[in-house]
Image (cartoon, helix red, strand yellow):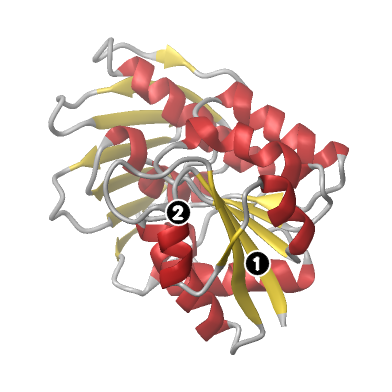
Amino acid sequence: MKKIGFIDFFLDEWHANNYPQWIKEISQGQMQVAYAFGLKDPESGLSNKEWCIKNNVEYLPSIEQVVDKSDYLIILSPDHPEYHEELSKIPLASGKRTYIDKTFAPDRATAIRLFEMAEKWNTPMFSSSALRFASEYRNIEKDGIEVINSWGPGRLDNYSIHQIEPIVSLMGDEAEKIMFTGTERFPALIIQFSNGRQATVAHSGWECPFHMAVNYESGKSKIINVQSDFFKMFMKELIDFFETGEVKVNSKETIAIITIIEYALKAAQKPFTWIDLPR
């Protein structure tokens, strides 16, 4: 049995609470979360040690020990990407297959540094929103996409990745500029890609499903309403990555996604103004 180590800002959060059972189930017991470390205890909820007792995971007092004892590594902290670089330095120097949870990095510069670290130490690594792997996005024709209109729930800072990740997976990493067009309560974006292609992102309230219209130069359209269990589909890809070392997302796309999110937050301070994206 292969053993996975969790490294988190704090362990009592939704991803850490659900991943162990999914990993055990989908790997058919061939992998399990065996070790964990949390940088701090949460302000409410279980302490890191209490979380480990509840989940039958061995708490280790340092990142070094988790890295040393584990076969594979997962860096969590999904809502605190500003800690990913600190949490990832030792794992990315280990050569062990490492997954870094969404949102990958707080900004483009950090994202580039993380990939440079992984490359320096030959450490297989990727990051992704689980939405990328929803079955509804599979087999979508990418050639000839002119405009994508996307809707979804959540806040701009920590939920926009769930719309931007599928957009970039379909339109590529050549995003050129961005404009904020929404309000504080209902953020919205226009992203312009190479050759005049565009995508819109709308956060339409927590009850809004993930929904997308893909429009082609030919005049065809495809409507996508995500209803599949995309977290389980993501987990299958994650387990395959651990088994094979096959990286599931191109680093250029991940860097483009983080760049879009970073500049979306800047664009929110200057609504209806185009802001150029670095490339």
Callout 1 crowding tier (Cα within 10 Å): few <14, some 14–19, many ≥20 = many
Q: Quadrant of residue 105?
A: top right
The answer to whether residue 272 is left or right of residue 127 is: left
Image quadrant in which the C terminus is located = top right
The x, y position of residue 74, in whole percent, is: 61, 56
Mark 1–mark 2 distance (CA, rounded to whole Å): 17 Å
Q: Is residue 231 visible?
A: no
Q: Which residue is painted at 35% across and 59% down in the image? A: 14
The answer to whether residue 243 is left or right of residue 95 is: left
Outermost residue toward the bottom?
28
Q: Amino acid at mark 1?
A: Ile
Q: Is label 1 in a helix, a strand or a loop?
A: strand
Q: Which residue is painted at 68% across and 42% down in the image? A: 251
The x, y position of residue 226, in whole percent, is: 31, 66
Q: Which residue is mark 1?
A: 4
Q: Is label 2 in a helix, a strand or a loop?
A: helix
The answer to whether residue 90 is left or right of residue 254 is: right
Q: Which residue is painted at 71% across and 68% down in the image? A: 242
**Residue 46, placed above or below residue 173:** below
Q: Amino acid at mark 2?
A: Asn
The x, y position of residue 136, in whole percent, is: 39, 69
Query: In the image shown, does 57 or 24 lie closer to the viewer?
Result: 57
The x, y position of residue 172, in whole percent, is: 57, 43
Label whose residue precedes the other's in the sequence (1 or 2): 1
Q: Which residue is mark 2?
A: 48
- Count of labels shown? 2
